[in-house]
Amino acid sequence: MKSQKKVQRIKITKDGPLIVTGGVLLGQDNIKIGADGEPLCWEKGPSYPHRDTYSLCRCGASKTKPFCDGSHVEIGFDGTETASREAYLAGAEKTCGPGLDLTWSGELCAMARFCHRGEQAWGYAERSDDPAARKEAIDEACACPSGSLVAWDKETGQAIEPDLDPSIGLIENPKEGISGPIWVKGRIPVESADGFEYEPRNRVTLCRCGKSENKPFCDGTHDSIKFRSGT
């Protein structure tokens, strides 16, 4: 008898944690900083023991981070989802270049800053008839964990996406001592507390500091408050 494939899903609970089902792999992704002080690349951190189901803290107060310990009840966490339910492109700005286009959503920016590596991605896009500049624009866009920044092929009109297996990464910036968001990869469905399913995307970042004003998504607030997960 063939075993059934597990359905992977993230369910947001009202004023509570994220319930992850389907045996989604969980690990840590570290931002490596280059000599110029800007993000250089991603480095894999430790992985967590495999679980079929687990609850991830999104209030920022759990003493057992990244997992929920019920602290959201004690602190009266308001996890109201305020993010737009429109598709990504409906609210994205567009920069057109000769070799490729870039779209960007400020509301979804997780402040990973890979788009500031070397020249900013938009500058490379404007010179994307040069193969080297085109490659840099694509590399910077594909390093964006939130999918806020996306490169688009000029000829096909298709998004140029990194190859990401379905998994979850907890973003850490060891050099700055700041913990970033929950990086959801590979089009894992994210369901709201009221049953709405957000647009499936190859990469999104969900808030885990509890302070985003664009919940359930990260808006970069962890950076300004210097959030530390303590994991």
Image (spheres, rainbow, N blue to C red):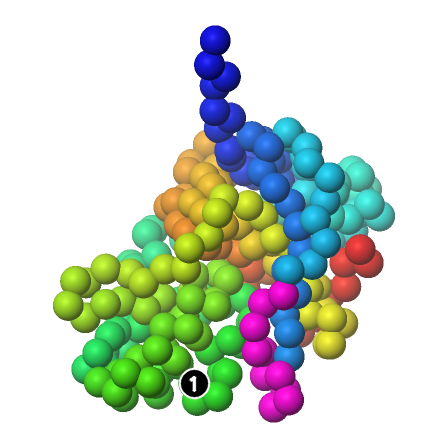
Residue corresponding to mark 1: 120
Q: Residue at x 31, y 73 (%)?
A: 102
**Residue 98, can we see it?**
yes
Identify the residue at the far left of this view.
155
Report the magenta residues as a range: 34-43
Task: Give left or right: position of 225 versus 191.
Answer: right
Task: Give left or right: position of 113 versus 34.
Answer: left
**Amino acid at circle 1:** Gln
Q: Residue at x 66, y 50 (%)?
A: 27
Q: Residue at x 27, y 67 (%)?
A: 152
Q: Residue at x 48, y 68 (%)?
A: 143
What is the secondary structure assignment of the residue under circle 1? Answer: loop
Q: Taking 135 as reference, is 171 above or below it?
A: above
Percent position of residue 134, x then y: 31, 80
Percent position of residue 20, x then y: 60, 36
> Is residue 103 in the magenta section?
no
Percent position of residue 94, x then y: 28, 73
**Residue 82, can we see it?**
no
**Residue 110, located in which quarter of the rendered image?**
bottom right
Front residue (pair 34, 182) = 34
Identify the residue at the far right of this view.
63
**Residue 21, located in which quarter of the rendered image?**
top right
> Is residue 37 in the magenta section?
yes
Q: Taking 28 as reference, is 30 above or below it?
A: below
Front residue (pair 76, 70) = 70
Q: Quadrant of the C terminus?
A: bottom right
Q: Residues within 10 Å of mark 1 (few under 14, many from 20)?
A: some
Percent position of residue 198, x then y: 41, 44
